Every structure is written in structure tokens, then in C-alpha cells.
Image (tube, grey):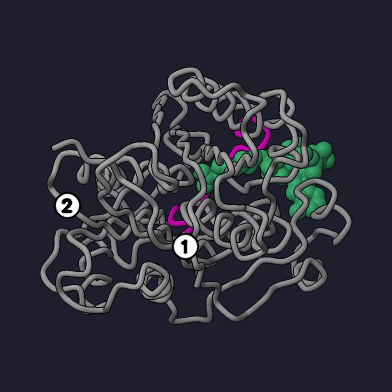
Amino acid sequence: MTRYAALAGLGSYLPPRRVTNEELAGTFDTSEEWITTRTGIRTRHWAAPGVATGDLAVEAGHRALKSANLPLAPGAVDAVVLATTTPDHPCPATAPQVAARLGLGTVAAYDIAAVCSGFVYALATASAQIVAGQARRVLVIGAETYSTILDPADRTTSVIFGDGAGAVVLSAVPDADRAGVLLGVDLGSDGSGRDLILIPGGGSRERANGEPDQRDRYFTMQGTKVFAEAVTRMGGSASALLDRIGWPTESVDHLVGHQANIRILKALAQRLGLPEERAVVNVDRVGNTSAASIPLALSDAAAAGTLAPGSRVLLTAFGGGLTWGAAALIWPDLHVV
Ligand code: ACO
């Protein structure tokens, strides 16, 4: 029997501490004006010491299950997929712990590592499990605590990234013409750009290099090169997907791009030939939350009533790897929690 994966629940969670540009200007060699004009970010949220990615993922996962009217009980979902760059530990994956804490029983649970593209990659694998008949419902979470990997000596990355989590429930449906069905996914990578976004230490490469250096555990990014790649790759992936599913570009009502920088979102809309107003923006309030970025943007836009049921929504993300991806769906009637 042919089955499709449809969005059936959506939730998000931000840690309570809101960090303003003004606060950062008092700590780093930067200014409120530089951060606002170069990135569009005004505030971001940082988790309190001791709070880990799994904690945020549990909150967002709980809300997405509630949004889908599913209990915190075995049988609610058949798998939990967690996209993150900041797992609680290098080993094991964070998803099994999140599944257990949510009371979901002994379901399949695994992490996806595709940096800021992680959520789109996670959607793709979860949807494939449903289409293949391996799962009826999957909880897909994007969660990050970048504040734990930011180099205090790097003013550029320190002002960009924020913590948070967003989650969706994908559910099997029998036909493709229902609102919420993932109509297509495009994924890509180019490992020759590995060094543009890199945490040098903490993996097997560091062990081969000898003594660990604490600073090697910090996140590094070559911002200007990443900026250009982000616009090109998200634009290319989005266009390839639109061609494949037969949506004319101008028919897209809402472009939900990875919330990295307001200038990237504007350049992306321009490259695709869409009016800037169709780009969903919440980077001003949450900063770059990497794998949590897309579900947080969806959650904010749905809660604000921007994403009306029946509208055409195009998601696209870009991140370390390099990796990128896009997905498309007709927005369903959802109660966001
Ligand atoms: N405050 C003040 N000045 C700063 C700061 C700061 N926080 N950070 C950098 N500068 C300075 C630089 O030192 C440089 O000064 P110089 O001209 O005297 O050398 C100047 O500002 C310009 O620096 P650039 O790096 O060229 O600034 P740019 O305009 O490119 O903005 C930024 C930097 C915001 C990082 C931008 O390049 C960007 O958004 N890049 C893309 C990020 C992205 O897309 N990430 C997505 C993937 S991330 C992931 O996968 C985890």
C-alpha cells in the first residue's frame, strides 16, 4: 500500500535566558549596531549552565506530541530522529535518551549530524521510513546548545548563534493530495568544503593528532565564504525541488530558509525571484540555532498565523559538511504548542 508522510504536530522550546546585543556588546569587542546591521539578529536565547541539548529536545518533543494529540507513552511514535551538532555526549547518540525521557518505549532512536541542514536531513530519513512502511509515526527534533561550543575569543560566531529546539510529528497518510504531506525532498553535500565550518577536536582526528587542545573543541566558521555558499546551495536545492514537484517559483507562499543571517534570507529570496516578504524571518529573535532553525521558524510563523492552512511552504537549509537540502509541503491545519 502506498503511504505518504504528513506533518501532524509541531512544537518548540527556547531556554528562558534571552541575550540581547547590548549585553554582548558589553562582553565582546562588538557593537549593537554591527550585529544588527550585519546579521539582523537582535536577541538569542542561551541555555543555563548544566542544561544540555537533550533537555531542550525533550521539551520541544513533548510539545510536538501534544500538538499531534499523542500521549507520552509507548506506541505514540515508532521512531525518534534528532538532528543536532551539539549532542549531549560524543557517544552515545542523544535521541535514545530523549525517547526514554518522553516515555516513548523502546522505539528506534538515532541522531542525524548534518549541522544546520540537520533538520531537513532528519525529515528526509523519517519520511523515507514512513513511505517504506517501517514506521507509522516519527518524532523529528532539531535541537542545539551552541552556547556550549562558542569560542569566547571569537566575536563573530559568539554573536550569531543561539540555543533552542523545535520538533514535528510525521504521520503516515494514504494519499498525496492531503495538506501536510511532504511532496519532495532534495539533499546534497560537498565534503571538499569541510574546513569552512569545523569543530577541529573531539573526534578521532584529534586523537590521531596527539594532545587535545581545549580550544579545538570550539566551533569555527569562515563566515564570508559560508555566506556565498549558503545562498548558492539553498537556492540551487530549492530550485531543483520546485522543478521536480512542478511548483512554479512564484506559487511559493512562504520561503522558510535556514535562519543564519537576514542578509542571506533576502539574497536567497532574490536569487529565487521571490518577493522578500515571502521569506519567513525569526533570526532577529533567536539567532542562528542550526538544526533547530527550521522547526523554530515554522513554529513561530504558524503560531503568528503567517502560515495559513493551504499555503505552499518551501523549506531550505545549508550547513557544515558542507550540506544542504530543501523540502516542500502544503501547510496543514495544525495547533502549534
Ligand atoms: N563585531 C564587530 N566587528 C566584527 C564582528 C563583530 N561581532 N565580527 C566580525 N567583525 C569584523 C571583522 O573583523 C571584519 O573586520 P575587518 O574588515 O577590519 O577585517 C569585518 O567585521 C567584516 O567581517 P566579515 O567576516 O567579512 O563580515 P561579514 O559581513 O561577512 O559578516 C557573518 C560575518 C555575519 C559571519 C556573515 O559572513 C555570515 O552570516 N556568514 C554566514 C553564516 C552562515 O550562513 N551560517 C550557516 C551555516 S552555519 C552552520 O552550519 C553551523
Give the residue drawn at x 55%, y 46%: 310
Q: Position of residue 5 (x, y in %)?
A: 30, 45
Q: Position of residue 50 (x, y in %)?
A: 43, 81
Q: Is residue 273 magenta?
A: no
Q: Quadrant of ligand 1?
A: top right
Which residue type does callout 1 highlight? Answer: Gly
Query: Does 148 sit left or right of 25 as displayed?
Result: left
Instruction: Name the secondary structure under disc 1.
Output: strand
The residue where tag 2 is placed is 135
Q: Position of residue 314 (x, y in %)?
A: 54, 37
Give the residue drawn at x 69%, y 51%: 281
Q: Quadrant of residue 104?
A: bottom left
| Whether residue 125 is situated above or below residue 236 in the rendered picture | below
Q: Which residues are magenta?
A: 215-226
Q: Is residue 54 visible?
A: no
Q: Is residue 223 magenta?
A: yes
Front position in the image: 210 or 24: 24
Instruction: Name the secondary structure under disc 2.
Output: loop
Graded by Cα atoms within 10 Å as few (under 14), some (14 to 19) or many (20 or more), the crowding at tag 2 reads many
**Residue labelled 1 has its Cβ within 8 Å of some atom of ligand 1:** no
Give the residue drawn at x 39%, y 53%: 7
Give the residue drawn at x 65%, y 58%: 287
> Which one is in front in this view, the residue at disc 1 or the one at disc 2?
2
| Whether residue 76 is situated above or below residue 1 in the rendered picture | below
Residue 230's tag is: none
Q: Reading the chain from its start, which is encountered first: label 1 or label 2?
A: 2
Front position in the image: 215 or 185: 185
Residues at circles 1 and 2 in contact by the CB criterion of under 8 Å: no
Q: Position of residue 40 (x, y in %)?
A: 78, 51
Which residue type does callout 2 highlight? Answer: Ala
Q: Quadrant of residue 322?
A: top left
The residue where tag 1 is placed is 166
